Image (cartoon, rainbow, N blue to C red):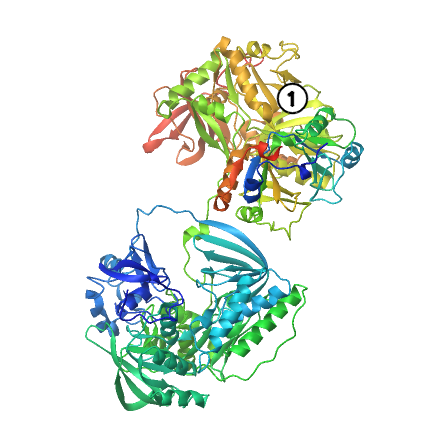
Amino acid sequence: MSNLHAQPLLDVGALQQCALIDLTALPRIGFRGTHSADYLRVRGFELPEAPNRAVLQADGSQVARLSQTEYLLLGGLADQGQRIADEEVSWELDHNANYLLPRQDSHAWLQLSGACISEVMAKLCGVDLRPEAFPVGAVAQTSAARINVIVINLGPIDLPRFQLLCDRASLAYFKAAVLDAMSEFNGALLEPEALRH
Amino acid sequence: MSLPNRLPAPMGLLIDRNQPLTFSFDGTAYQGLQGDSIASALLANGRFLLSRSFKYHRPRGPLSMAGQDANSLIQLPHEPNVLADCQLLTQGLEASGQNFNGSLENDKDAYLGKFSKFMPVGFYYRSFYKPKGIWKFWEPIIRKKAGLGVLDLDFKPEYYDKAYLFADLAVIGAGPAGLQAALTAADAGAKVLLVEQQSILGGSLNYARFDIDNRRANTLRNQLIEAVQAHANIHILTQATCNGWFADNYLPVIQGKRLYKVRASQCLICSGSFDQPVIFRNNDLPGVMLTSAAQRLMKLYAVKPGKRAVVLTGNDDGYLAALDLYEQGVDVVALVDLRSGPSNRDLLVALEKRSIRCHLATTVYEALHDKGMRHITGVELRSITGQGQVAGHGVTLACDLLCMSGGYMPVYQLLCQAGGKLAYNDAAAEFTLSGLPNNLGVAGSANGRHTLDNVLADATNAAATALTALALPCPTQQSFKAEARVNFPWPIFPHPKGKDFVDFDEDLQVNDIINATRIGYRDIQLVKRYSTVGMGPSQGRHSALPTARLVAASTQRSVSETGITTARPPFEAEKLAHVAGRAFDPFRQTPMHAQHLAAGAKMMPAGIWQRPAYYGKASERERCMQQEALHVRTKVGLIDVSTLGGLDVRGPDAGELLNRLYTFAFLKQPVGRSRYALMTNEQGVVIDDGVCARFAEQHFYVTATTSGVDRIYQQMLKWNAQWRLNVDIANVTAALSAVNLAGPDARKVLQTLCTDIDLSSAGFPYLGVRQGTVAGIKARVLRVGFVGELGYEIHVPSRHGATLWQALMNAGKAYDIRPFGVEAQRLLRLEKGHVIISQDTDGMTHPDEIDMGWAINRSKPFFVGRRSLDILQAQPAKRKLVGFTLPTGSPKPLEGHLVLNGPDISGNVTSCEHSQTLGQIIGLAYAAPEQSTPGQQIPIRVDGGLVVQATVVQLPFFDPDNQRQEL
């Protein structure tokens, strides 16, 4: 299984400058409950050790820990998020405290990349997202452009990028706000294909 | 290009001599250079008169050349009150003067100055209100005279925005102290933000002279700037103004059209100090300027400020400025020292060598002028005989430039906003600061250090303090050398004829301040409010110190006891556009948004959601809405209800949680059934309603109102944080997309797309809930009756919302399906007498008032609001929501129209529409209990004061047996 981290990029120049990619179509889910950690470990996921931390999985999917008992799983490009989609299908409500959260339907997913991403976000959000304050592996659950947004930094360092998750119904609004903030950095909206071979 | 007043290089740090620009001022064409300010370009052309003063319309020229005074306020085509000494010149710029009657050169209102004795401070408070009613006469005249400049009401809004900036250390001011402090901190590893108001770094190093040979400043400037600009840890913002200090170093910094919201762990103010004027008669006329202004003109803009100069000073810096003027070809007629001599005798020798005569213990008593006062022509010097006193006779010198400096005032505004306390040091005749927060420091001349060595040492020490707080390595503390006094203790020389200005902005003279104290305003804050001293554009930069001195002397107190007025943000004028920034107005759209637009929907806001109000032209709203409603009654309609709140409540205690939160009972609710859910708050007030569907033993799906769901979600989390029930609460509003398929043919349409649910009346009865597939999509299906017809709410994952909508529209074609909007839905539910929480209820409504007593379970021990409801129910009812009708053609009441009960108001209309189905106007309104019996008439006051008599009827208006929705 290929690794998103190591994938050659088709449009490295644009990605490195300032790019926004709408990954809303990729699978993602959440789990919450006191049994969620055990459930996910059994299913082969490496989990962050603390809340507001994220870990890149070997297959390119990503796991962010949003609280003591809540996890957000983002699908990888290599399998088009199939592993995560399978997790959604296979989950069943039982007597364990492990509740599936429909994050693909509740949250839109944007990837902001480029050297200036912390400056772009500084136009929208009051949290210090500079690399020294918000390193690779960090998660911020904050407000950007006046709506709730989850910001995940899973690097890599040589191509800074933030995964932004916001209310799905607010996608049109938030995407426009981010693109507006990107304009002074000559930012561009790219298709997800820019991330593939 | 050659202009008579333009000096050769290396003068003119800011200008580009190869880029000439043409512009006009008051209709006259001029030439300037790229890098010029409007004021410097005008002065290069020999034009000194820039403005007229606020009250007496006296001619005014540049005072500070640093944007710190009101003398340079001019009008641009789209903007009044622009500082000509700050505004960068651009090609083709058209500027003009402001606040004159006639022309700037010949202001007809200049005669007002001759009547200044009759217009003392506060005269208008006392003059224009007697006899009664006379204010109506004076008001338009005064209003016409008041205010500066002209607003362009056709101005098009421009793009302004905001951004956060983060730093370990923010250094405000990039003069020698700021540069040194930034370097020291950055070398130690701190991330430094350096904020400079001017377009270049260097501060006083760019224009001031620090030694007779004039070597130190330039060398030091080059060294510091080169090091700072090359440093990776220093982020430089030039032409940026830190306009305030707020708790924890939250600093608004304005640069261009952006407001930076700076968050700094540590902050160091290196803002320098303001050159202070000397007060004498006519100290405000063109040709009189601060010494630093003349130096700025020469060094920054290569503008020769005059031909024959007199330098009036209270410190050694005036001697150095005289050398500057001399070297640039200005005939320095005299140096006038308020003191008995310079602290450094070499300065005296240096001037004598150049045949510049020095007058010691002398002051300028009056500036002389030509007819019309457009420029000074000379000065009268008098020997100083005591504090503010001069000899009876003096000498007159001809000159066209008078440079004055009575000393320095620290730029204390940000520091005082942070809680710093100013204390007056009588020995140094200047203010010192103390009591700053731990995360804020001060260095340089703002901290009373004026020699370069001391400034650099002070900056290093201040940076070290900040570094210690940041847990970074810091340099050792440096010591200071003794300094000469820079402030003359009493640079105020009142003249019997006045025009000895303390505050140039407000035309306040020495006697104005003294008279204010004599009237009884002893407190400096009261003097300010009475006289308006310090309330003009320069905010006391040049008037605070002399005012403090005058009030102190007049009230027999020390300057420290007198104090100065409060410094509040902003530091300088800022535009509302900066405060507003880029507007963020979030909106939400359902997955079917594009399909609604394609179908011609007229969208309306519902909270922050965008929803179809109806489908059709805005001009045909009533027809569209009525047709859509009729279609639902007769055939089948489809409405997007994705905005409806949705909450998944799961876990062993899910039923218990709902049982405590809602008024009904839910513990024994069967799986596969829904139940109406009404929520009250602790005061017993109805705050939301919805449907609670039980899909599994441990899984409830609760709907909530569009606008209320976030609040209900919060309530659930809040209460469960106390109750600690074993339950998970998830807000799935955006995650689930939903439609309501309603109408007599709804079942037939759904049957074509849903095969795994028994849709028969018996298999899936009213209030039943099922999970299955619709159009191949996993769906939650609820039988509901909000619009009073056979109806199915179909909830699917949002990613499939658009597909579901299209599938139902396609399947419904055979049954003439059409979409309907919120307005039709509101009419349909009104016909059924269903209330909408927050439209038909308010912040006081309790269940009995809206006939919801049936939704309260009295057998369970507790629910939120239970105790309050018990109390309320024991009280006599005060109002009741009733249904009313009016014949078609009657004036239609609107929401909010009042219901009357004799002379009293007994309630208001909450909903009202014309019902085509019922052929009459129907509505809901609060009325007195005694007005609520069906058949009674209630008077409703409609538009125009007309009162209509509506008939109270039993609810619902339509299908009272609910036969249609229970099909």
B579, A134: nearer the viewer = A134
Q: Where is residue B173 in the image (x, y as percent from the top left)?
A: 50, 66
Label 1 environment density (alpha carbons within 10 Å; few <14, some 14–19, many ≥20): many
* Rendered-image quadrant of the N terminus of chain B: bottom left
Q: Give left or right: position of B963 versus B31.
A: right
Q: In which quarter of the image is residue B550?
A: bottom left
Instruction: Check disc 1 and give the amino acid type.
Output: Ser
Query: Taking B220 as reference, is B304 left or right?
Result: left
For disc 1, the chain is B
Picture coordinates of residue B911, whole percent (x, y): 45, 27
| Residue B606 seen | yes
Front residue (pair A14, B170): A14
Residue at position x 48%, y 53% in the image = B259
B239, A195: nearer the viewer: A195
Picture coordinates of residue B958, whole percent (x, y): 49, 16
Q: In this view, does B512 lie to the left or right of B589?
A: left
Q: Is residue B170 left or right of residue B102?
A: right
Q: Quadrant of residue B420?
A: bottom right
Where does label 1 land, which residue?
A: B674
**B646 w.r.t. B251: above or below:** above
Residue B96 image-quadrant placement: bottom left
Q: Position of residue B40 (x, y in %)?
A: 33, 66
Q: Residue at x 41, y 60 (%)?
A: B573
Locate the C terminus of chain B and report the quarter of the image it occupies: top right
